[in-house]
Amino acid sequence: MAAKREIVLDTETTGLDPKSGHRVVEIGCVELVNHLPTGQSFHRYINPERDMPEQAFAVHGLSISFLEEHPVFAAHAEELIEFLGDAPLVIHNAAFDMGFLNAELKRLDQPPLESTRAIDTMLIARQKFPGAQASLDALCRRFEIDNSARTKHGALLDAELLAEVYLELIGAREPSLALSVEDAAPAYERPASRTARPPRPHAPTDEERAAHEVFLEKISEPIWRR
């Protein structure tokens, strides 16, 4: 059976809508194969070629002075596309991240990422826990995943946390019912040797026979004498 490869993906941006001129400023991706992290990741900061609104800066803490020292999206596009390959994309609120990435790809006349590739963990969480909060922080609390390092949003850290949340949502972290080698009951082993014992005497003594006869005489009309 071929290995199942998935990419957990997150972005940070300058705002909420790429149609209003907002851009991607950070991309973080984590690779899963057969629902196990491989340790392979993709992480880039991106110069958005525009200003950073205060509201966005408050969310991720990425300043323009910091981002201006990094390449623009076009410099990373080919490497990103190669890393993603044709794998399904695990994203929290997929429409947001896919919309921004496709806007960046459109500027470069590159084909868009198909929406059918997206596995939206927010939708999965809302279906599994109707009425409950479905933010990444809320799901980390629900599954007791340590997100104490998440003082601000960060694409790679969020992708790593989302990978753990995703595996919990789909039940891929449930413990196996099989016992470990250490816990398994030991197999029965026949003793190597036994000490022979003399046979126990079973024949009654003369005293026992006499006592038995006296006992039988006390029984009125025993059936064995009919």
Image (cartoon, rainbow, N blue to C red):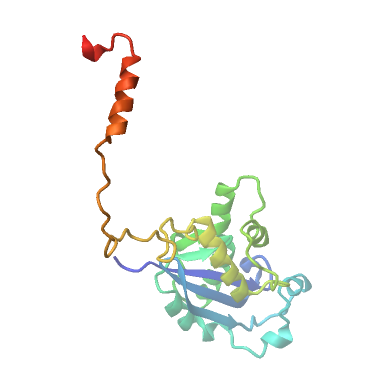
Extreme residue in the bottom direction:
69
- 155 relative to 136, above or below: below
| Foreground of the two, 143 or 49 | 143
Q: Is residue 125 visible?
A: yes
- 114 relative to 222, above or below: below
Residue at horizontal 67 percent and vertical 59 percent from the top: 141
Q: Where residue 103 appears, x then y in whole percent?
A: 55, 71
- 205 relative to 18, above or below: above
Q: Quadrant of the C terminus?
A: top left
The answer to whether 184 appears left or right of 62 in the picture is: left
The answer to whether 129 appears left or right of 149 in the picture is: left
Residue at horizontal 31 percent and vertical 31 percent from the top: 208
The answer to whether 51 appears left or right of 142 in the picture is: right
Residue at horizontal 42 percent and vertical 79 percent from the top: 82
To which quarter of the image does residue 179 belong?
bottom left
Q: Where residue 159 appears, x then y in whole percent?
A: 57, 70
| Foreground of the two, 85 or 152 | 152
Extreme residue in the left direction:
226
The answer to whether 28 appears left or right of 55 in the picture is: left
Q: Where residue 105 appears, x then y in whole percent?
A: 51, 74
| Foreground of the two, 131 or 24 | 131
| Foreground of the two, 139 or 64 | 139
Q: Quadrant of the N terminus?
A: bottom left
